[in-house]
């Protein structure tokens, strides 16, 4: 059993992966699959949305004789990522207080 991944969580995870280094779609998918079940067909609409919202930008780079589209985080994307991280920390504390029995008793 797994937990569903919301659009906001997926956006934040993609931004975090690309923040590490500029990369391309297939590589992002492979990295995300370490934690969540995501396909390339799910990822590309996310990448387009992030690009449309000016959180990511693209450039083409030749690799083994062919062009690959690379993604990089914009300044606006870095600000969004920091906000996502803050929200995630607060959310995780609240969920852990219940799931891990760390909160007050009823």
Image: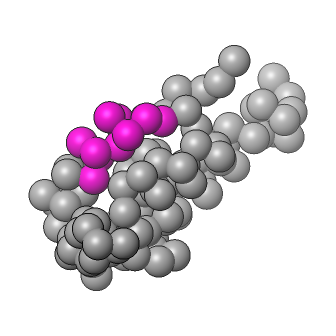
Question: In the drawing, does residue 51 fall left or right of residue 105?
Answer: left
Task: Identify which residue is drawn at 85% across, 40% down.
Answer: 102
Count of marks, rendered view: 0
- Residue 12 position, x and y percent, is 44, 56
Residue 72, magenta (yes or no): no
Can residue 56 be seen here? The reply is no
Is the magenta region chiefly helix, strand or loop?
helix
Q: Identify the colour scheme used.
A: one colour
Task: Identify which residue is drawn at 26% across, 68% down.
Answer: 66
Q: Residue furthest top?
A: 1
Please state which of residues 6 and 96 is positioned toward the viewer in this rendering.
6
Residue 46, magenta (yes or no): yes
- Residue 8 position, x and y percent, is 38, 45
Location of the N terminus (image quadrant): top right
Question: Magenta region: which residues?
Answer: 38-47
Task: Identify which residue is drawn at 20% across, 51% down.
Answer: 48
- Residue 106 position, x and y percent, is 81, 23
- Residue 96 position (above or below residue 13): above
The quarter of the picture where residue 73 lies is bottom left
Please state which of residues 101 and 75 is positioned toward the viewer in this rendering.
75
Can residue 31 be seen here? The reply is yes
């Amino acid at each position: 059993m797994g937990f569903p991944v919301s659009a906001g969580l997926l956006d934040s995870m993609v931004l975090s992966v690309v923040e590490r280094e500029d990369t391309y779609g297939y590589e992002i998918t492979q990295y995300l699959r370490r934690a969540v079940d995501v396909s390339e067909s799910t990822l590309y609409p996310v990448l387009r949305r992030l690009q449309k919202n000016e959180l990511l930008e693209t450039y083409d780079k030749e690799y083994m004789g062919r062009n690959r589209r690379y993604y990089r985080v914009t300044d606006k994307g870095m600000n969004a990522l920091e906000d996502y991280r803050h929200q995630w920390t607060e959310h995780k504390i609240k969920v852990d207080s219940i799931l891990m029995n760390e909160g007050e008793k009823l």
